[in-house]
Image (tube, rainbow, N blue to C red):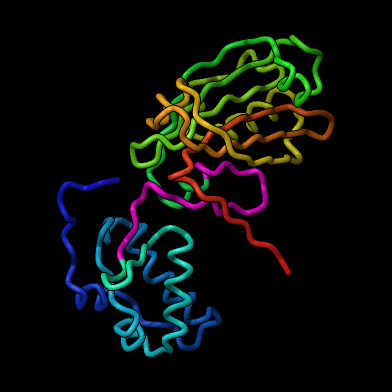
Amino acid sequence: MTNTEAPPRTPLRALLEALPGLDRNGDLPYYAQIKERLRAPIQAGRWPEGTLLPTEAQLQVYFGVSRTTVRQALADLEAEGYIVRHPGRGTFVASPQRVADRRPRRLVGFLETLRARGVDVQSEVRGVRTVRASSRVAASLALPLGSPVTEIRHRSLVHGQPIAVSRTYLVCAGDLDAEDIRRKGALLTSLREHWDRVHREPFRHARRVTTATLARPEEAQLLQVDPGSALVLVRLHVNSDRRPVVYLQALYRADRYEYEEFLEA
């Protein structure tokens, strides 16, 4: 996001004095405490995009820790998309348009996770209808080609800017409440609740496949990018205990989406 005017910068001394000190007797490492103390005002909106943050040396002196500890905290915040560092200029609060996908390894929607973190996420249900399953949809849902399925067309925005469009296909969902999805702004949660209520058959596991693709004209218009722009394509296959029940195809703007996964060594 490009601003025509530079945002006001809070004096660095005031920024520092507003930060709580460290818990010297707690179990949380110092770098993690510093990270949380810097992240909280960003999430709360008290430090808007472009706010200049204290230097590493200032943070080191204020918190009474090593430079390495400060650098670890800042590196984590940068990796999570909260700050951006410019050599020779300083460290600034990053644009809220680029948000990192840091979900736990369970079936929770990316945008639902963002909303739980306090990010401004809007949900647009662009249509719910019954269609005939294409070869890909039929194979994903273990149905004969041409079987009737419910199609949900959906667009998501973060801070008023489009980040994703999706088409979701669900088996036997003629009574699905589109208004419920709009109201909750949580597609996967609404689908899970619908399926459990109607079929008494909860979602059990899912498989996610991520790849790259290029924006076609319709997708480009919805995402406000040029045709041919790079997009991240996510395919999600959701199963109950007995059968496949949901197939989702989501397209994310590559300039506003990151996927990060933590693995045990």
**Quadrant where the C terminus is found in the figure:** bottom right
Image coordinates for residue 28, horizontal then vertical, percent: 53, 78
The quadrant where residue 138 appears: top right
Q: Which residue lies furthest to the front in this view?
A: 228
Image coordinates for residue 112, horizontal then vertical, percent: 51, 42
Residue placed most toward the observer, 91 or 19: 91
Q: Which residue lies furthest to the right in this view?
A: 242
Image coordinates for residue 68, horizontal then vertical, percent: 46, 84
Question: On the rendered structure, is 159 left or right of 239?
Answer: left
Residue placed most toward the observer, 60 or 245: 60
The residue located at (17%, 55%) in the rendering is 6
Residue 54 in the image: above or below residue 135: below
Residue 114 in the image: above or below residue 198: below
Residue placed most toward the observer, 261 or 25: 261
226 within the magenta span: no
The residue located at (67%, 52%) in the rendering is 105
Residue 73 in the image: above or below residue 129: below
Please provide the residue range marked out in magenta: 92-112
The residue located at (54%, 16%) in the rendering is 128
Image coordinates for residue 235, horizontal then vertical, percent: 65, 34
Question: On the rendered structure, is 86 left or right of 244?
Answer: left
103 within the magenta span: yes
Dominant secondary structure of the magenta stretch?
loop
Question: On the rendered structure, is 69 left or right of 249?
Answer: left
